[in-house]
Amino acid sequence: MSYQIGIIGTGNVAWHLARAFENAGHVITDIYNRDIRKAKHFALDFFNAKTTSKLNFNDSNAQIFILAVSDDAIAEIAPEILLPKNAILVHTSGSVAMAALGYARTENQGVFYPLQTFSKGKAVNFSEIPIGIEAENKMTENALNSLAKSISNKVQLMDSRDRRTIHLAAVFACNFTNHLFTISKGILENRNLNFDLLEPLIVETLNKSLEIGPNNAQTGPAKRGDFETLDNHFQALSNNPEIAEIYRAISQNIIDYYSEE
């Protein structure tokens, strides 16, 4: 089934979802941003879309509205949205409960959560991205399930508590890991060394973790109890106490984890 879809927000998630929906045969009918210039720029690729800086969609033909805004804006914006009769309103957050839509002017509320990190202009394969859906009623659930399966092979019902747990785990797996890459890059650049040196190691680490499980793939001085190397590394970071503390805390956690096995 093809849906007509309104996009509220023009950030990274909105950018990727809108393109995935259109590629799957759905029609983007409305694009909102409070800055109309951003809405018009976003709409350049969607010839059927109307742009607006107002949250009144009473005259829209859209059946589903995707509220893809920052987490802290969801509960603030939702009650202000005027929707056509029987329209569905969903947010896309992993950490915000569906109840944040509680004051929206529709009973057809839900969550459409793509479990992926998004950057504008960086293509992703949506068919492999897990999508978690939650719905206030069966009609909404059926529609979201149909919409999700049109772009992904990995669709799963999940409640707000499970979604928050997944989002927390994702922060460790994605955001924290990427920040550690940034720290590694800085350490190398301080000696005029190139981060590309670590690329084969990073790729092999990720592949091995996925193949045999992260606990089985763990290596390094903390895992093997090499306290001399740990101390040398810690001393090498003495001029950067914040990074040294990160090194100490993670190393100690690895030591504690494997000492309990």
Image: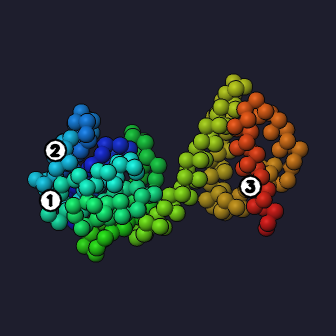
Closer to the N terminus: mark 3 or mark 1? 1
The structure residue drawn at horizontal position 26% and vertical position 41%, both measured from the top left corner, is 33
> Is 66 on the left or on the right of 239, as rendered?
left
Front of the two marks 1 and 2? 1
Q: Quadrant of residue 1?
A: bottom left
Quarter holding the C terminus is bottom right
Q: Which residue type carries mark 3?
A: Asn
In space, the residues marked 1 and 2 are separated at their CA atoms by 15 Å
> Is 258 on the left or on the right of 208, as rendered?
right
Q: From what the image shows, is residue 143 above or below residue 118? A: below
In space, the residues marked 3 and 1 are separated at their CA atoms by 52 Å
**Residue 177 place in picture, x, y as percent:** 61, 47
Front of the two marks 2 and 3? 3
Label 3: which residue? 253
Residue extending farthest to the right is 228
Label 2: which residue? 50
**Residue 57 place in picture, x, y as percent:** 16, 52
The structure residue drawn at horizontal position 74% and vertical position 55%, both measured from the top left corner, is 253
> Is 235 on the left or on the right of 2, as rendered?
right
Residue extending farthest to the left is 59
Q: Which residue type carries mark 2?
A: Lys
- Residue 25 seen in the figure: no
> Is 131 on the left or on the right of 56, as rendered?
right
Q: Which residue type carries mark 1?
A: Pro
In what element is the residue under mark 2?
A: strand
The structure residue drawn at horizontal position 41% and vertical position 45%, both measured from the top left corner, is 123
Which residue is at the front of the view, 80 or 145? 80
**Residue 95 place in picture, x, y as percent:** 45, 57
